[in-house]
Image (cartoon, rainbow, N blue to C red):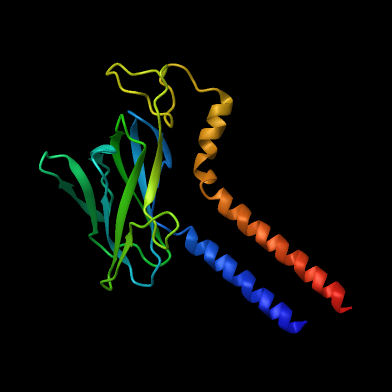
Amino acid sequence: MKTWMSALSAVLLSMVLFAGIASAHVNVYPKESVQGTYEVFTVRVPSEKESPTVKVELKFSVEEVAVSRVEAKPGWTYQLTKDAADKITGIVWTASGEGLLATEFGEFKLQGKVADSAKQITWKAYQAYKDGSVVEWTGASDSKTPASVTAVKAKDAGAATDSHGHTASASAPAAATPAPAAASTEAAAAPAASSAPLYFSVAGMLLGAVALMVSLRKKSR
């Protein structure tokens, strides 16, 4: 019985640790947008090593998003990467101080327009640490270092446009008419939804493990 309990404890610990690691990827929010929409994108970078994160590079396709502005971030400088047509294809943030320590995370914001024909936006991130190591968040969704992806929906044929003919962002509040209460509730809950499936999965595994423990204890009596 003690052997079973020890093995089960090890499995539970592994699941919890895996859940923490899986949620600690570099991510770009929002996770969903609409074609032709102007968005403020947030790059969330958790530091996963004892060595500080001192540089973050983000690359994207001009065929998917047209980035136009970057928010200044205290303690960091940034440099834009452009193609031959002078379009922004990447941003490099470099720490002017200590950077992001082991227990910290940082958020870097940029503004841009989702391409009218985009199906998704793939964000390739390169996280550099002070010890010289670099983690490339460029892989497939099921890899250890996946690239962050923003899913893009087709623009509704009846979607409202602003005075410049641009589609209003689905994540932004309407200027003239307040959004319905239900829609506001959904928008407020959106950031938490991205992690909910992971937490539910972990909770389900823990409950299953507890049930197994109770069953084994009954059999041992």
Which quarter of the picture shows residue 154?
A: top left
> If the image is split into quadrants, where does the N terminus sit?
bottom right
Vertical order, 49 against 59 (above or below): below
Residue 195 rendering spot, x and y as whole percentages = 53, 50
Tell me where residue 6 sits by quadrant. Answer: bottom right
Q: Residue at x 40, y 66 (%)?
A: 48
Q: Residue furthest right?
A: 221
Image quarter of the C terminus: bottom right
Residue 37 percent across, percent down from the top left: 34, 29
Q: Is residue 211 left or right of residue 109?
A: right
Q: At x 83% / y 74%, what residue is drawn?
A: 217
Side (left or right) of 213 relative to 97: right
Q: Quadrant of residue 155?
A: top left
Q: Is residue 180 above or below residue 123?
A: above
Residue 179 image position (x, y, % from top left): 50, 23
Residue at (63, 72) in percent of width and height: 11
Tally the marks.
0
Looking at the picture, how far across and down is residue 75, in whole percent?
27, 56
State the residue at coordinates (10%, 43%).
84
Considering depth in this image, is 116 or 93 the residue closer to the camera?
Answer: 116
List the single residue furthest toward the left: 84
